[in-house]
Image (tube, grey):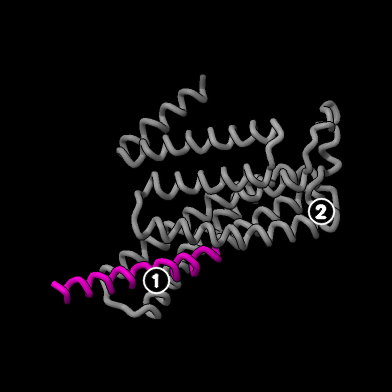
Amino acid sequence: MIILVYSGILLVLSIIIGKSRGLRGIISLLFNFLIIVLSLILINFGFNIYIISYLAFFTISSIIIFYLNGYNVKTKSAYIGVIVVTIILNLIIYYLNYKLHIGSFSYEFTDEISAYSFNIDLKLEQIVFMVLLYICVGSICDTSIAISSALYEINNNANLTKKELFASSMNVGKDIIGTTVNTLVFSFVAGFIGYILWHNYDSLLELINYSGFVSEVVELICAIIGCLLIIPITSLIEIKFLKNNNFKKNKNRLQS
């Protein structure tokens, strides 16, 4: 009952403050939740985890970027940037997953999972890959839209060259990435306080070698790397779109 009450308060505040945009935000959140649930159901029925993860990732990205912000130069640039960064992140996630062997449970979870059957026919490395991909989607899309919107406004209010536009976007990106990284780090610390208190009598060396700690750090690293890469990549893509559009407009004016 309490959850329903607070959900209702969230809905009302979103509509009052954000109006139609706030309502779309709530609807997109529900759609994304349903997509994640559906992906888990399909995986449970034996569908390939990698394929389901990619389909869910790009569907969620489309909803976050296009449904909330419309279809325009800014959102196209942001979405292409997300695709490029995702390809790069896949290589990083695969490498870290392979080298650090994070697809396993730490000993502290043994009692919690001992009552369950281990005959689930799923590889934990694939589950970890899906989790890392889902963790990165929100921060990457948010940063991509932020930098593409800022760059679009800069281009509309100043006649700059490609090099000047890129330099301006990097200056804006420094401010964006500063707050984004802090948000990610504090989220990591807040979610891990209980784990640290649980192991407060262990040495630091033992703590950082636990599988649970390593997997959380890898999630944080992948999210930060994604946010760092998305800024220059989205900027370069949007600059190309903007300059091509300016060239077409000038050409049409000359012809008319």
Taking the view exactly as shown, the residue that stands out farthest to the front is: 255
Looking at the picture, which amino acid does disc 2 mark? His
Q: Which residue is mark 1?
A: 240
| Callout in the foreground (1, 2) | 1
Taking the view exactly as shown, the residue that stands out farthest to the top is: 1
Instruction: Residue 100: name its quadrant.
Output: bottom right
- Give the residue displayed 43% in from the left and 72% down from the top: 171
Residue span colored magenta = 227-256
- Give the residue displayed 34% in from the left and 68% down from the top: 242
Q: Assess whether residue 122 is covered by the magenta stretch.
A: no
Q: Position of residue 204 (x, y in %)?
A: 82, 57
Q: Position of residue 96 (x, y in %)?
A: 74, 59
Q: Determine whether the residue tagged by mark 1 lies in a helix, strand or loop.
A: helix
Q: Residues within 10 Å of mark 1 (few under 14, many from 20)?
A: some
Q: Residues within 10 Å of mark 2 (few under 14, many from 20)?
A: some
Q: Assess whether residue 242 is covered by the magenta stretch.
A: yes
Left or right: 186 with respect to 12? right
Q: Which mark is residue 101?
A: 2
Work out whether residue 185 or residue 117 is closer to the camera in this orientation and state it: 117
Left or right: 152 with respect to 40? left
Q: Position of residue 20 (x, y in %)?
A: 31, 38
